[in-house]
Image: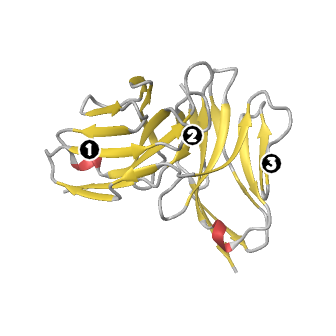
């Protein structure tokens, strides 16, 4: 049974560019949450998708957007990248009120 | 609003000893859940243990136990018989009640197990 997978593993982008991160949930899970973890910090909740709609959103600007597909996989898009967007981006999947299982993360570096 | 506080940036423990990692929380929800995750240097968050706010018994999972003191709003993680592979970052997290299923994390504690 495959767990949560994320791609790519690492990514280097330049300020002002746009980036798309991808997440495939654990088999049987229908909900995907995204978190940003800056160096030395705990993860911060970005948003959660359920039934292809954004169900909850944390305190992140509109530059951060997402999408969930009919197969429950999800994308996180960040526009107009800033140096401060450099972080580990974690995807977690679950049933809507269930335990969240995390993927290995995508490490984004903005130069 | 929910808040998790972890006051120990780093901890050392000798192999085979027990260690307690502290976590306090703040919430106005009556129903909530408390979690502990382990994050090795590879980055993946590994679920360790869960405690519901209405659970009367402290949660246990193998070598992990959660010392839940509701009146003090604390949810400390106890690791018994520490192993070298336990060296990692440990995060306490909370999930609120109602329809809120997002996790709120603390800043973490780095545990180093020594010989």
Q: Residues within 10 Å of mark 2 (few under 14, many from 20)?
A: many
Tell me the subunit letter for badge 2: A
Q: Tag 3's secondary structure?
A: strand
Which residue lies under the disc numbered 3? B60
Separation of residues labelled 3 and 2 (CA atoms):
18 Å
Q: Looking at the image, is A85 positioned above or below residue B95? A: below
Q: Position of residue B33 (x, y in %)?
A: 67, 32
Q: Are marks 3 and 2 on the same chain?
A: no
Tell me the subunit letter for badge 1: A
Q: Tag 2's secondary structure?
A: loop
Q: Is residue B106 visible?
A: no
Q: On the picture, is B58 further left or further right than A86?
A: right
Q: Is residue B64 visible?
A: yes
Comparing A93 with A17, the one in front is: A93
Which residue lies under the disc numbered 1? A20
Q: Looking at the image, is A56 positioned above or below residue B86? A: above
The quarter holding residue A100 reads top right
Q: Residue at x 62, y 30 (%)?
A: B26
Q: Position of residue B18 (x, y in %)?
A: 79, 64
Q: Looking at the image, is A56 positioned above or below residue B49? A: above
The quarter holding residue B83 reads bottom right
Q: Position of residue A57 (x, y in %)?
A: 40, 26
Which residue lies under the disc numbered 2? A100
């Amino acid at each position: 049974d495959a767990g949560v997978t994320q791609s790519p593993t690492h990514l280097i982008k330049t300020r002002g560019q746009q980036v798309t991160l991808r997440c495939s949930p654990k088999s049987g899970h229908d909900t995907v949450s995204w978190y940003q973890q800056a160096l030395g910090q705990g993860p911060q909740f970005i948003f959660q998708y359920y039934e292809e709609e954004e169900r909850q959103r944390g305190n992140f600007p509109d530059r951060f957007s997402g999408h969930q597909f009919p197969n429950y996989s999800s994308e996180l898009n960040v526009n107009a990248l800033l140096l401060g967007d450099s972080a580990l981006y974690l995807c977690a999947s679950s049933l809507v009120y269930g335990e969240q299982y995390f993927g290995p993360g995508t490490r984004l570096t903005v130069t | 609003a929910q808040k998790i506080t972890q006051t120990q940036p780093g901890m050392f423990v000798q192999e085979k000893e027990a260690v307690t990692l502290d976590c306090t929380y703040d919430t106005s929800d009556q129903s909530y859940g408390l979690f502990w995750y382990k994050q090795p240097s590879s980055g993946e968050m590994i679920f360790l243990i869960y405690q519901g706010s209405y659970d009367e018994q402290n949660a246990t999972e193998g070598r992990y136990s959660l010392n839940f003191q509701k009146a003090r709003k604390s949810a400390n993680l106890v690791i018994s018989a520490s192993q070298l592979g336990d060296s990692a970052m440990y995060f306490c997290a909370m999930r609120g009640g109602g329809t809120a299923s997002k996790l709120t994390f603390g800043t973490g504690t780095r545990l180093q197990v020594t010989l």
